[in-house]
Amino acid sequence: AMECWVLNESLSVILVLSWLGVNLYLFFDTFHWYEEEESFFYTRVILGSTLAWARASAVCLNFNCMLILLPISRNLISFIRGASTCCRGAWRRQLDKNLKFHKLVAYGIAVNATIHIVAHACNLERYHRGQSAEAGGLLAALSKLGDTCNESYLNPIRTFHTNTTSELLMTITGISGLMISLAFILIMTSSTAFIRQTSYELFWYTHHLFIIFFISLAIHGAGRSRIVRGQTPESLLRHNVTFCRDHYAEWQAAAPCPVPQFSGKEPSAWKWVLGPVVLYACERLIRFWRFHQEVVITKVVSHPSGVLELHMKKRHFHMAPGQYVLIQCPSISWLEWHPFTLTSAPQEDFFSVHIRAAGDWTAALCRAFGAEGQAPKEPWSLPRLAVDGPFGAALTDVFRYPVSVCVAAGIGVTPFAAVLKSLWYRCCEPQPPLALSKVYFYWICRDSRAFEWFADLLLSLETRMSEQGKTHLLSYHIFLTGWDENQVIHIALHWDENTDVITGLKQKTFYGRPNWNNEFRQIAYNHPSSSIGVFFCGPKALSKTLQRMCRLYSSADPRGVHFYYNKESF
């Protein structure tokens, strides 16, 4: 288990360092090239080092735009995971975990785009100063090129009285650059956790501005040739820059120094993004094909807590604990696909999801299936669903440790439903012995009634494990952080020594929050020489606390107890 964790972490570190290394290499290599390239000597006279800053950041921007589409091509990653014989074990799980790489690349785009915009703003100011009355010498001579016949310009700002902002917005480069910036700002701001949780539809639709982003990026690269220009190869053969730069007054008179000719370089942005765009188009085709695959709804359960449980079947559907699917209901929206964690075990002959009405789309879906107190619908009147997936498998490492600690907060409990079910099947069916010998499960919730379906699952597991003599395998602790006076009175009046009043389980519910120091200290004491996997799904504040506990209670002795932290995104 420790080797598995080290390999996973090493792969993540290698991926991030490789990405950072390639970015730095491209930036400084391009920067050096534009600082030294002879064909851009006259351009550097006007623009100085801002030319190199603009071009180096542009190359890094193209590189990151090439990468940004790859992690979100879920179906292609799923295909690689399933079809490649060399993609097994830690490498397979690493593909799932590296979906977070998408966010890192987005930050890279933001940084390089900022550098690029600032550098271009400086370029425009330098172009403008080149036409001022104070400009003299070679700078003035270069800025005046293009005023007569048989000359090509180097400075796109033709007079000092030109408004650079309006001039820029009248060019293809300026308009496309503005479109790129606006699209990216909207995509980034709508991708925050607050927007995703409060208005998923806004996040979903705004994120599709990436189509405008990539089209504008290709157009921007093509229009750049009118703004940043270098000396043509033919002009370099006839015009000796080393000699002629000091004899600019003799360019038209001296034979060795004809007037230099300039042109834009061939656009290259489209070459960077063509491959990922084609792959993404293939991804869309796969999703379109899966959209038309039949999904049979075998069971609909409307829980009293307002949670809708759907059991479904689909041909060639294979899952692992902790994975999720994308679901679309055409009768509600033809465009929206929403992610839901699978709550069934791989050993079951169906796959299931639990959906709680937390927004417009989920509320409409619950109503369509007869939830929220409505009368159950007949099977033939149920709306059609399309399912894409499954994707992701971060929690499969639960079974690779001798001891696992699973911590869920609120709705973060959903991924652990499939894990606990799978644990039951693996322990109670004739299979090879598990490496896992103990699971500690912690569930922190504000209102247990919101997740009664999960308490029912725990009750079922508790009963069946007791019948099989496997009660030692699972130790669970439920913490209720929110209660009122009515609940206190109810607990006092219905107190039972054998079962909990709130959940009906043998394990009593705790009130308040766990003391993580005590919990980790006790677990470390119970398993003094074990590798313990800690798995969490919930808010960031608690995640940081658990990470700190893992570091604090891991032994410095290689033979001692070690906690390895794993976070599940939701």
Image (cartoon, rainbow, N blue to C red):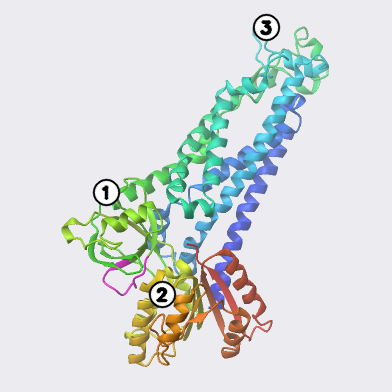
Question: Foreground residue, 209 or 514?
Answer: 514
| Residue at image location 65% in from the left, 81% down from the top | 553
Look at the numbered disc 3 and give the secondary structure of its residue.
loop
Circle 3 packing at 10 Å, graded few (<14), some (14-19), many (20+), is few
| Residue at image location 57% in from the left, 45% down from the top | 64
**Marks 1, 3: nearer the viewer:** 1
Residue located beneath label 1 in the image:
331
> Does 533 sit above or below residue 233?
below
Give the mark nearer the N terminus: 1 vs 3: 3
The numbered mark at residue 419 is 2
Whether residue 440 is visible, yes or no, is yes
User: Rounded to the nearest whole Å, what is the CA distance between mark 1 and mark 2?
Assistant: 32 Å
Q: Give the range drawn in magenta.
A: 342-352
Give the mark nearer the N terminus: 2 vs 3: 3
| Residue at image location 75% in from the left, 14% down from the top | 257
Residue located beneath label 3 in the image:
148
Q: Which amino acid does label 2 sit on?
A: Val
